Amino acid sequence: MTVNTFDPTASLVTVTDSAKAHFAKMLGNNQDKMIRLSTKVSGCSGYAYVLDAVDAKKDNDLEITLDNGLLLLIAADAAPLVQDTEIDYVKVGINGEIRFNNPNVVSECGCGESFNVG
């Protein structure tokens, strides 16, 4: 069994151009807001991703400034769970959805709402 240690100096997450554009559109004229990624205990597999538009950073949040000027915050307790994750926005038919391509995931529930890391 391999155990990965969280390294805060490593690339925490990457965000695709389509996800950056989606976040900018989601915030609209509220460019002073930030996107915050956290996790919560949920579902049958363990954790769920939570994305929120927020007005302020929490004390321990990690900051990533995206090249389109938006600020992405990562909750400190979520950082080890999402390290090396790619955040993407994809069109599925007429709908769009955020996808988390997380290499740390060892299992997901059947509906895709929760995940577990090894």
Image (tube, grey):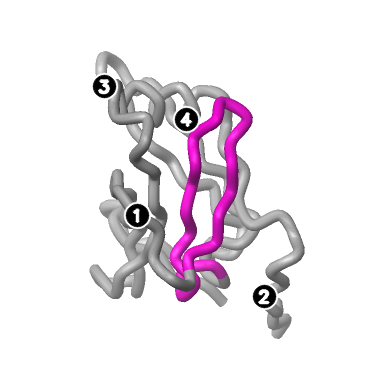
Mark 4 touching mark 1, by CB under 8 A? no
Q: Amino acid at mark 1?
A: Ala
Q: Is residue 5 above or below residue 54?
A: below
The residue singled out by tag 2 in the image is 6
The residue singled out by tag 1 in the image is 56
Q: Is residue 118 above or below residue 50?
A: below
Of tags 3 and 4, the one toward the viewer is 4
The residue singled out by tag 4 in the image is 19
CA distance separating discs 4 and 1: 21 Å
63, 95: nearer the viewer? 63
Residue drawn at x 26%, y 14% as measured from the top left: 94
Residue drawn at x 57%, y 31% as measured from the top left: 16
Magenta residue span = 61-79
Mark 3 touching mark 2, by CB under 8 A? no
Q: Amino acid at mark 3?
A: Asn
SS state under label 3: strand
Residue 88, position in %: x, y?
49, 35
Quarter of the image with the C terminus is: bottom right
CA distance separating discs 1 and 3: 29 Å
CA distance separating discs 3 and 2: 34 Å
SS state under label 4: helix
The residue singled out by tag 3 in the image is 95
Q: Say whether disc 3 or disc 4 marks the residue closer to the N-terminus.
A: 4
Query: Label 4: how many residues lie within 10 Å, few (<14), some (14-19) or many (20+)?
Result: some
